[in-house]
Image: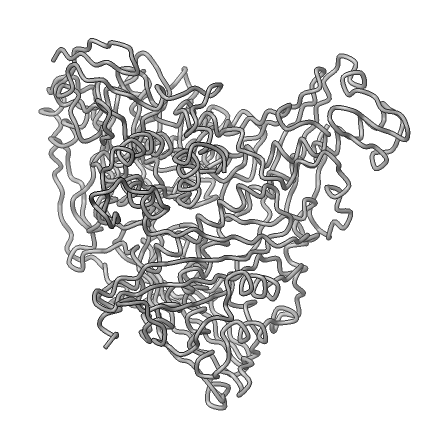
Amino acid sequence: MTRHLTMDEADTRRRLDDMVQGTLGTPFDRPDGPLKVTGTAPYAAEWQSADLCHGVLVRAPVTKGRLKAISDEAVKALPGVLAVVSGEKMLRNPAQGMANEAPVQGSEDIVYFGQPVALVVAETFEQARHGAQALKLEIERDEDFAIDPNAVEPEVPEDKQSSTGDLDTAMRDAAHSIDAVYTTPAHSSASMEPHASIAEWDGDSLTLHGSYQMLKFNRNELADSLGIDPKNVRILSPYVGGGFGSKLGIAPEAIAAALAAKELGRPVSVSMTRQQVFETTMRRSETRQRIRLAAGADGKLTGIGHEALVSSLFDEGFTEPVTQATPFLYRGENRVIGNSVARLNRTCAGSVRAPGEAVGVTAFENAMDELAEKVGIDPVELRRINIPDEVPSQNIRFSSHKLAEALDEGAKAFGWDKRNAKPGAVRDGEWQIGMGMSSAFRVNLLIESEARVTLKADGTAEVETDMTDIGTGTYAVLTQIAAEMLGLPPENVTVRLGDTEYPPASGSGGSFGAASSGTSVFLACEEIRERIADAVGCTETDLTLKDGMAIAGNRSTPLTKVLDGQNFEAKGHVKPGEAQKKVRQATYGAYFAEVAVNSVTGETRVRRMTGAFAAGRILNAKTARSQCIGGMVWGIGMALTEDLVHDPRYGQIVNHDLAEYHVAVNADVPQIDVILLDERDDWANPLQAKGLGELGICGAAAAVTNAIYNATGVRVRDYPATLDKVLAGNT
Amino acid sequence: MQTELKINGDKHVLDLDSRTTLLDVLRHHIGLTGTKKGCDHGQCGACTVIVNGRRINSCLTLACMHDGDEITTIEGLGTPDDLNPLQAAFVAHDGFQCGYCTPGQICSATAMLKEAKAGWPSHVTEDMASTPDLTDAEISERMSGNLCRCSAYPNIVDAIREVARGGKE
């Protein structure tokens, strides 16, 4: 039996609050933890096979051109080399998230530096690497390329522009106004596990051990790229070494491995080098954002302008949705919101953790800090008085809105009242000390998802879905949801993920994974509860399940007895519906940071950081906290060090490794306080839970740069706030 | 090249391509895939193993240079059913998310605790002559060769601090 739900209305039953097992929401340890800390969880490239051979991708060392020929005779003669694969099926770049079809294919047309154009396969990795380095490509260069987003005429898509009221007049009449330009550089996901695939054919059927986030889409993308029936494709991704958007869509190494494995009749393993990960998987676009704020003497906003320029590769539908959250952030009836895109010969732009808000809210929260100073009002208070009652100019209610509580709780925990509002006023030896804050906003989504739950005759349960756990805690939270609903100790629940043989899930992305796949598990469990209730002779709502006992009225029966040798199996299936249109669903939060800026060197150290977040029901206090910490640390990286540098002459990524692209390291990060507010969002889903994987980065960097301003009086509007930029203004 | 390696107490005699790194021997030739390849350039620390008692990046060294060496990998520290104290502390404090950098973090921390006990100073040690206290700043500094993009750093520090102080806090 399958229980279906289309989310058209609020679910005010709050069934999970009626459950008594007491595991949901607790800081339950990840069930996958013992495998991960012992190195026994198998990631994509780690599947063992006796006749496995290895492939290494070959990149085009030009920005634009035509691959005329590959001289592969010499390479094929090298010891151990088995094949050189190229041609029209190779991927130009990865598929975008939820593409569900092949991305642009073909190795002949080269449109960005580093584009993978061939694969050399050999018996050993060393032989394949040597062959890849020795392969001669005959390329006709095309010098007519575009690499500077400010030097081309951008596309201005009509559906990405909106205007309400009269912003120009509002700006003219404003008691206080801000009109400033902020820029953020390109970023890389840089997940720790490089993209990797092992492809293995059995006749016409392909099995791919891959590192992917969204398997039901990846299966169709893979099949479409190869021209085969999706039924003949199985993808396994039980463990994924980080994704952050870079593994949403099928990537070049998977197709190359599949083509080579078919040709050779042997399993082929292809891992990207770290440099290839930087060059040929998605980057976050750089942005140029003009932000205008018009406010009355009291600081209440009357107008908002947010216009962004981003870039992307030719023929790509995705553009960084910088202004995605802007329509509902704050008050202000006069608005101009727009997004433009420059088409460039740069590595493909796509989703990187919190596309849109990560950079859009960050710049906006810098502008709010500037406005607070002009108005002469506390930055927390400026946010509070500008919280709208409904989505401005759309007459849509909020499903729930806890920004005010997040601001208050965060400020209290951090000790915001001790901040000296005057920039440059606090010193600690040669260090200048400052405090800054910002708000967090992120849209909330529900994506179609299915799961199968089996309550077995022995009183244990199994959950199966092709959902992935990319570090997000899926194994933990799905265990807890099933355990809570079925009244089982969590150790009696086994969750199996990452296999397209299981029911198709939402996948991990856009912060919707836990709530979407969790709802499908919830629905399957509701169905099983009905069957148990039938068996013990009560209604489902009168049934209590705890520690393997079914309790109805004053009768308590062991589940094993109720099951009487049978398995109860059910599927749950949830689809988004009208609820996403009837109300504005989003998550909210507030960040507070204290920095020390060295007055001699310009170095910024984050001394402490607090984040308060509201994301509906918290499913696991431990993994939720970790997600928030992760996001805030990305905020520190964005604020201070992360900068994917494109060479101004040829457009290639200059810092294409982990030595030169500076993600935050342990010593960059202080202890971080996370406050998770108690909330139920009935419009989101029957769990009343919302997404949390991205909220931690949606404005976090602004708290740091606003703190730098408070410490030094230096406004860095061009991210990241490196030493040179801070020193230059700090006289 | 014939090379003899003692890995987690077991002797392995291997005939290796001289270009093979210690990391690739572990992953491709012996099937010990707990040691991870994150960058292959000594920049991320995911491949950290302990060679003759010291932590090194196994991607930056050729296997044939380690003839006769004693190598400890993550598989040599504990099993899922019998975690060692650091492994258990990483689980309890959620010192990881995706888990890919974790074996390297734990091998690195294992050797780091011995370095600190032996009185080795770090960049943040103020008194170079005394045995350093493992403050949070010391732990963070000494663990900064191991990147974690999920950014579990505060939890990693919590886990290591607990073990350094001899048990649960």
Residue at x 73%, y 26% (from the top left corner): A547
Q: What colour-coding does the image apply?
A: one colour
Outermost front residue? B130
In front: A312, or A157? A312
Query: Does residue A93 appear in this view?
Result: no
Residue at x 22%, y 45% (from the top left corner): A659
Give x and y (percent) for residue A201.
38, 18
Q: How many marks?
A: 0
- Using the rendered view, name the quadrant where residue A204 is placed: top left
- Using the rendered view, name the quadrant where residue A613 is placed: bottom right
Give x and y (percent) for residue A80.
16, 17
Give x and y (percent) for residue B128.
20, 45
Query: Does residue B26 appear in this view?
Result: yes
Give x and y (percent) for residue A282.
35, 47
User: On the rendered structure, is A97 left or right of A489?
Assistant: left
In front: A525, or A280? A525
User: On the rendered structure, is A141 left or right of A253?
Assistant: left
